[in-house]
Amino acid sequence: MSSKQKGKLFVISGPSGAGKGTICKKIIDETDVKLSVSMTTRAPRPGEVDGINYFFTDKEAFMKEIREDGFIEYAEVYGNYYGTPKAEVFEMLDKGIDIILEIDIQGALKVKETMERGVFIFILPPSMHELRKRITGRGSETEEVINMRLSQTLNELSYIDRYDYCVVNGELDEAVNRVKAIITAEHSKVTEDIKTLIENYEEEKV
Ligand code: 5GP
């Protein structure tokens, strides 16, 4: 394949608690795809590390980043700000590295406006009952926050038509395999690079 080939941008989103974070972590561990680290004004949860899970910051620094046009997209999610830093993502794509953005649905729709070649994957929970169980099991959110997140979920599901793929996360390994299959399929598409390769075949003497 030509060295001009750029990395692919995979946008993984879906309701909070659907398991997109866990799926993305396995994809990162088991493939060459890299995760874009977002900036957030949310406080770190136990075990989260600055620069690995998120760049944790305050509202003032986040607003400065917005003014300086530093984000591909940003959104206010459940009272906190989250944004995808622009420079790092474009740099990695230019180097031919595949990137995953694990972002909320509002953010994904904004990315779709500007990055039309992105691949949009929606992660669904197997049921609303299971979703509540998963969010409650985290133990990090109050009952009020859990109810707010669940009531947003049904509304969020109405955007599924804007996505290219949908993966139900019932059994984790099965969902991870499906996302890997999507990544492989996207790399098998007929592109300009493949057309160049075929032109080279024609020039070869056989
Ligand atoms: P959490 O607080 O549970 O880590 O994330 C809350 C929500 O924010 C999740 O749906 C997560 O995918 C989303 N999120 C994380 N980073 C970003 C980002 O950079 N932009 C947007 N729009 N959403 C994000």
Image (tube, grey):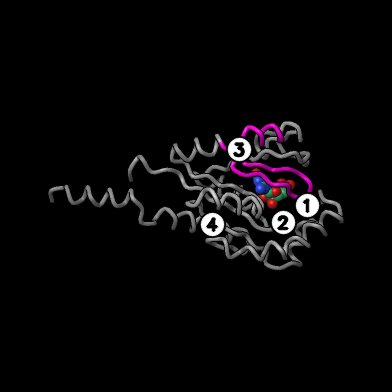
Q: Is residue 72 magenta?
A: yes
Q: Earlier in the sequence, mark 2 or mark 3?
A: 2
Q: How many marks?
A: 4
Q: Are marks 2 and 1 in contact (CB under 8 Å)?
A: yes
Residue identified by numbered label 1: 138
Residue identified by numbered label 3: 85
In whole angstroms, how far apart are the C-alphas of marks 4 and 2?
17 Å
**Residue 46, placed above or below residue 173:** above
**Disc 3 residue crowd, few under 14, some 14–19, many 20+, Cα 10 Å:** many
Q: Is residue 5 magenta?
A: no
Residue range corresponding to the magenta coloring = 62-86
Dot 1 beta carbon under 8 Å from ligand 1: no
Q: Amino acid at mark 4?
A: Val
Residue identified by numbered label 2: 17
**Residue 128, placed above or below residue 44:** below
Q: Are marks 1 and 3 in contact (CB under 8 Å)?
A: no
Residue identified by numbered label 4: 179
Mark whose residue sits in front, 4 or 3: 3
Q: Amino acid at mark 2?
A: Gly
Residue in the picture at 77% in, 50% down? 78
Q: Amino acid at mark 1?
A: Arg
